[in-house]
Amino acid sequence: MTTLAAPSSPDPSRYDVDALRERLRPHRDGRVDDSIPALAGADPDLCAIALALPDGSVVRSAEADVRISVQSAVKPFLFALALLDTDGGALDRVGIEPTGESFDALILESGTGRPPNPMVNAGAILTASLVDGAGPEGRMERITAGLSAFAGRDLDVDDDVAHHERLLGDRNHALAHLLRAEGVMHASADDAVAVYARACATLVDAETLAVMGATLAGGGVNPRTGVRVIPERVARDVVSVMATCGMYDGSGRWMREVGVPAKSSVSGGIVLAARGGLGAAVVSPPLDAQGTSVRGHRASAALSDDLGLHAFGR
């Protein structure tokens, strides 16, 4: 991939995110996801970039306050909450290996019946079901509160998006029934999908996603609030799985080109957790064949090069 370097300082606090954004905007390849009406109506020209620094400050471009539903970018945070609420027991119920398959593949581990990892739909449906709460409503409340703690502010849920996710999520229902049949998930299939759908419908923007990424990158402490959201070990486990599985069957290419643990979403968001406690996010709806934001991939590669973020760089 040809990266797009922005004229800026290697100091993240002085990085010119708007210059990078202007370089990206002419790139119009990719396709907006149309699996539900709210996604199909996304603005293909939307492009926003944000960096969340360890001191709690945020460097943000224009449009960094435009909200999208978080969709699959919620998966690392569901995994974190499940690890926290089960005292690590979630690792007995979900694998941590990449699959090379699509995010919604109807595949479980041979012999165990576990989802292959928490970054695919089967794994996220399971981890959402492991979060504490009295029934589905209690789990939904716990997840919204947990995501808000990662963000450092109260987050809202788009009820219309959640409704369509449940209504049109036939493959997710199939995965939930498979998990039930294998005995690895105890919640009902309908309840599990409802909880997961509502988590995916949480509204975020580039600035919020960057702060959430920084909370993971900073060992579980929110850089804005100073509150420890998860233990350092949980943060390490989550970021490790993001590195190997976060970009689905494009994870190897991503780590070679960008080298930063990340998670994509069909709404066009990408959240990154970089070394040194830096969080980053890009929001741009047009997607490539792997379901990754095209501009988001280019922006992430540029940020990695310009700021020296590659995990295996000098």
Image: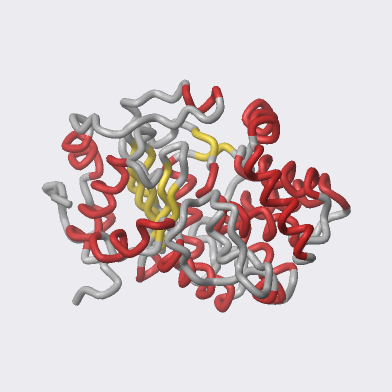
Q: In which quarter of the image is the C terminus?
A: bottom left
In screen coordinates, is 266 left or right of 139? left
Residue 175 place in picture, x, y as percent: 67, 51
> Measuring 72% from the left and 58% from the top, which residue is drawn there?
179
Residue 158 visible, this angle:
no
Q: How many numbered badges does the structure rendering display? A: 0
Q: Is residue 303 left or right of residue 158?
A: left
Q: Which of 119 and 8 is in front in this view?
A: 119
Which residue is at 35% across, 31% downward?
31
Residue 246: percent from the left, percent from the top? 45, 59
Q: Relative to residue 283, is residue 76 depicted above or below?
A: below
Query: Furthest residue to the right?
Result: 134
Indicate the colouring scheme.
secondary structure
Residue at 17% in and 52% down: 1
Task: Give the side of residue 133 with respect to residue 230, left or right.
Answer: right
**Which residue sits at x=56%, y=78%?**
233
Residue lying farthest to the front in this orientation: 110
Residue in front for this viewpoint, 159 or 182: 182
Residue 28's image quarter? top left
Visible in this render: residue 235? yes
Q: In this view, does 12 lie above or below 217?
A: above
Q: Nearer the viewer, residue 201 or 177?
A: 177
- Image coordinates of residue 273 in percent, x first then y, are 41, 62
Residue 286: x %, y % from top left = 35, 33
117 up-or-down from 129: above or below: below
